């Protein structure tokens, strides 16, 4: 029986998933700036048995046309927030088993800067850190705020990311021998010089020649996550990632993406079945189905067309409200200004129609995304009903688990932990946690904190 893994998808901001619910009485997310909010959340997750707390992050924001969206500001839709990597050491002091995954875009800084930052986080958490590798989001906004004349093309960003990850791994895996750190007070020897090696790298996009000053940490390389299901994204994940976060749309579409990633991993000489592939999951769960459906109805009532359009514009560069509602997205592609297709490609392709199915109209897209945003699957019911739906999704998709995307935080994670996790654990779906496990050991369910020798980065 396949064991399942669960994380919680969060942002150091007001809102997850580009939807609107922080103003609801059941949500405490407006207190995101208070460290105590996150300490409480981390303790809830650890007690429930979640594998990790996952933070999305980025420098972008929703733009409509050439300017910041007024709706994004008014409702806090993917706008406003802080750097989540800086809260991790605080949370590590209040937990002992919970892992932490932090998003960092490639191309924002040099790989040595990121490598040193994640080494620090791995050390401070005792080997409980993961890096979610992305090539960026809202790239039109990011290009402007970084002073770039134009945003880097989608496929080129992935070419750059491949070098970025490879060079970062050189620092983590090849710069210090295992016994190079001595730290002997009696002899006064800190490290063996012959155990420290220069990293020399000459790529098309990144270069380096020098030494990595951060001593080895429990995992050396953080657990490598990747989010992105475009063709380039799937190929990148198959080669580099240990855990892949895919867009959960329909079970059939997700199953196709999962199978493709596993097959591509096999082509790279990896064990495709060893990749942990997860999707987002919005859960409305309560003691009874009636109460759960009431929660869902209250959330749905808070969503509007303008919220949907704001999020979609920020993700893809397409303003749905400026289009003919009775036509499909092909009306944009036929008059492409160069921005469309360079970001959020998976959220464009999903609405173009394929395999004989007609493309939905803009009106149908708005209706489909309302309350969904960038969220994945949605399940509703009692604890038993939700557990049944989760197992059915696993059977249909071959996923290895889910990232819970809270609507009312941290209430949703606490309710899931109390009403659903015990049932899945009783059914043998939750792996037994070994004391002192690193995040890699927890995710792979195998001993050994280091990146496996079969990985090309080692």
Image (cartoon, helix red, strand yellow):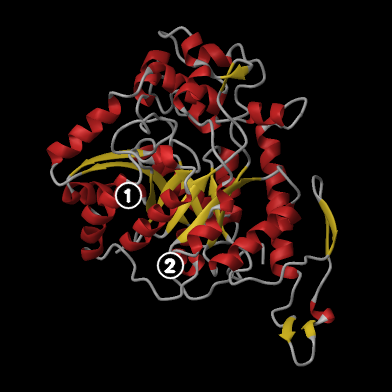
Where residue 455 sits, quadrant-wise, is bottom right
* Marker disc for residue 342: none
User: Which residue corresponds to the image point at 47% horizontal and 12% vertical from the top-left?
Assistant: 321
Q: Mark 1 = which residue? A: 413
Give percent across and percent down for residue 284: 25, 40
Left or right position of 177 against 235: right
Q: Quadrant of the C terminus?
A: bottom right
- Residue 360 visible somewhere in the drawing: no
Image position of 84 with respect to 317: above or below: below
CA gap between label 2 and label 1 equals: 17 Å
Give percent across and percent down for residue 183: 72, 83
Q: Mark 2 = which residue? A: 97
Disc 1 packing (10 Å; few <14; some 14–19; many ≥20): many
Residue lying farthest to the right in this orientation: 209
Left or right position of 376 against 155: left
Work out whether residue 320 or residue 187 is closer to the camera in this orientation and state it. 187
Helix, strand, or loop for circle 2?
Answer: loop
Where residue 43 sits, quadrant-wise, is bottom left
Q: Quadrant of the N terminus?
A: bottom left
Give percent across and percent down for residue 48: 31, 60
């Amino acid at each position: 029986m396949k064991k399942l893994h669960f994380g919680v998808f969060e942002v150091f901001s007001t809102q997850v998933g580009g939807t609107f619910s922080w103003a609801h009485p059941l949500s405490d997310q407006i207190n995101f700036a208070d460290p105590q909010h996150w300490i409480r959340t981390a303790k809830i997750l650890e007690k429930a048995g979640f594998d990790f707390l996952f933070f999305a992050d980025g420098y972008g924001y929703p733009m409509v046309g050439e300017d910041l969206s007024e709706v994004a500001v008014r409702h806090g839709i993917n706008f406003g927030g802080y750097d989540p990597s800086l809260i991790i050491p605080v949370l590590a002091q209040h937990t002992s088993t919970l892992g932490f995954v932090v998003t960092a875009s490639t191309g924002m800084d040099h790989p040595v800067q990121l490598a040193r930052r994640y080494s620090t986080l791995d050390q401070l958490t005792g080997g409980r850190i993961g890096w979610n590798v992305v090539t960026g989001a809202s790239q039109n906004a990011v290009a402007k705020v970084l002073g770039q004349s134009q945003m880097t093309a989608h496929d080129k960003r992935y070419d750059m990311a491949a070098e970025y990850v490879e060079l970062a791994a050189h620092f983590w895996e090849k710069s210090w021998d295992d016994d190079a750190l001595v730290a002997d007070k009696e002899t006064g020897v800190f490290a063996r010089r012959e155990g420290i090696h220069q990293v020399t790298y000459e790529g098309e996009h990144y270069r380096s020649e020098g030494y990595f000053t951060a001593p080895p940490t429990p995992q050396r390389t953080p657990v490598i996550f990747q989010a992105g299901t475009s063709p380039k994204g799937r190929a990148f994940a198959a080669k580099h990632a240990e855990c892949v976060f895919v867009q959960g749309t329909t079970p059939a579409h997700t199953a196709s993406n999962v199978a493709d990633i596993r097959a591509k991993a096999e082509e790279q000489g990896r064990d495709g079945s060893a990749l942990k592939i997860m999707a987002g999951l919005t859960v409305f769960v309560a003691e009874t189905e009636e109460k759960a459906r009431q929660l869902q109805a209250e959330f749905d009532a808070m969503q509007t067309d303008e919220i949907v359009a704001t999020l979609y514009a920020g993700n893809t560069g397409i303003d749905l409200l400026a289009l003919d509602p009775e036509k499909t997205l092909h009306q944009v592609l036929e008059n492409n200004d160069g921005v469309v297709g360079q970001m959020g490609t998976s959220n464009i392709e999903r609405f173009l129609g394929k395999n004989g199915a007609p493309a939905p109209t803009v009106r149908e897209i708005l209706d489909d995304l309302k309350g969904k945003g960038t969220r994945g699957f949605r399940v509703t019911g009692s604890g038993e009903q939700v557990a049944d739906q989760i197992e059915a999704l696993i059977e249909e998709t071959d996923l290895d688990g889910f990232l819970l995307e809270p609507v009312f935080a941290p209430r949703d994670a606490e309710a899931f932990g109390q009403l659903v996790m015990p049932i899945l654990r009783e059914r043998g779906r939750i792996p037994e946690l070994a004391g002192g496990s690193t995040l890699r050991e927890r995710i792979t369910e195998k001993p050994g904190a280091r990146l496996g020798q079969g990985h090309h980065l080692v």
